[in-house]
Image (cartoon, helix red, strand yellow):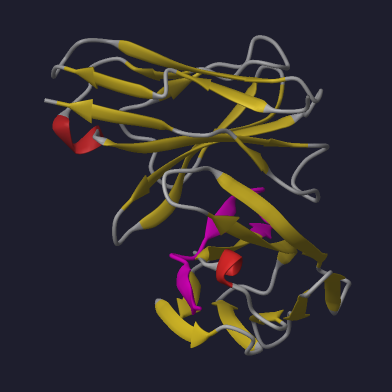
Amino acid sequence: EAQVTQNPRYLITVTGKKLTVTCSQNMNHEYMSWYRQDPGLGLRQIYYSMNVEVTDKGDVPEGYKVSRKEKRNFPLILESPSPNQTSLYFCASCVGGVNSPLHFGNGTRLTVT
Amino acid sequence: KQEVTQIPAALSVPEGENLVLNCSFTDSAIYNLQWFRQDPGKGLTSLLLIQSSQREQTSGRLNASLDKSSGRSTLYIAASQPGDSATYLCAVSGNRDDKIIFGKGTRLHILP
């Protein structure tokens, strides 16, 4: 089944403890992206990647890192999480750049205390 | 900077009615515009994608239009059903920087 898989679905952590949210797609998509969704602010793009070893900042990249060492994986890294990073995170992917439908994962709900 | 606006933020209509959701964007330099559906606690599902050279796309009871020059898109839902209740989001892909920018969505409730 074609899908974007995020793990974990739920995560509670403490301020400053490094964490990684994984994202994997099995559709051979070139484009992958991370979003956060907050009430009243909607979906905001954190980072995106056009292909392996190519990453770019979205609108809210501060406090996050990403890597794209393999085509199928695009992990989101929070080196020192803070409470303002409490949010619902989505990974998405699509074929060949951005002129194709985005496929989303089911989301990761992160709480930083 | 691209900005995407969706009005209204919420909408309730009786079952069976036809309805229109609106999306506007400030920068017409786009690759495409997409409409998504999001159910509570779930990810987004792509409904329709309109490329910048197209005027509309149809899928079943859904029809999306695009007027790039005026920065507007509409999603038309025919013969609404309770199962259509969800949040609908539009997103534009810019051809200047490959970013995909979302509107805040319209929360739709179809009354049985």
Q: Position of residue A26 (x, y in %)?
A: 75, 20
Q: Is residue B2 left or right of residue B49?
A: left
- Return the residue nearer the eye: B3 or B57: B57
Indicate the quadrant where residue B26 lies: bottom right
Quadrant containing the N terminus of chain A in the rendered view? top right
Q: Is residue B46 left or right of residue B6?
A: right
What's drawn in magenta, residue-wise?
Answer: B93-112
Residue appearing at x 80%, y 48% in the figure: A100
- Return the residue nearer the eye: A5 or A100: A5
Q: Position of residue A24 (x, y in %)?
A: 63, 18
Q: Is residue B26 visible?
A: yes
In the displayed structure, would residue B108 be above or below residue A75?
below
Q: Position of residue A68 (x, y in %)?
A: 62, 16
Total marks shown come to 0
Residue appearing at x 80%, y 51% in the figure: A99
In the displayed structure, would residue B13 be above or below residue B4?
below
In the displayed structure, would residue A66 be above or below residue B9?
above
Residue A77, magenta (yes or no): no
Residue appearing at x 22%, y 20% in the figure: A12
The residue positioned farthest toward the right in the image shown? B53
Residue appearing at x 70%, y 68% in the figure: B29
Q: Is residue B5 left or right of residue B21?
A: left
In the displayed structure, would residue B96 be above or below residue A37?
below
Q: Position of residue B70 (x, y in %)?
A: 67, 88
Q: Is residue A2 left or right of residue B108?
A: right
Residue B100, magenta (yes or no): yes
Quadrant containing the C terminus of chain A in the rendered view? top left
Q: Is residue B95 visible?
A: no
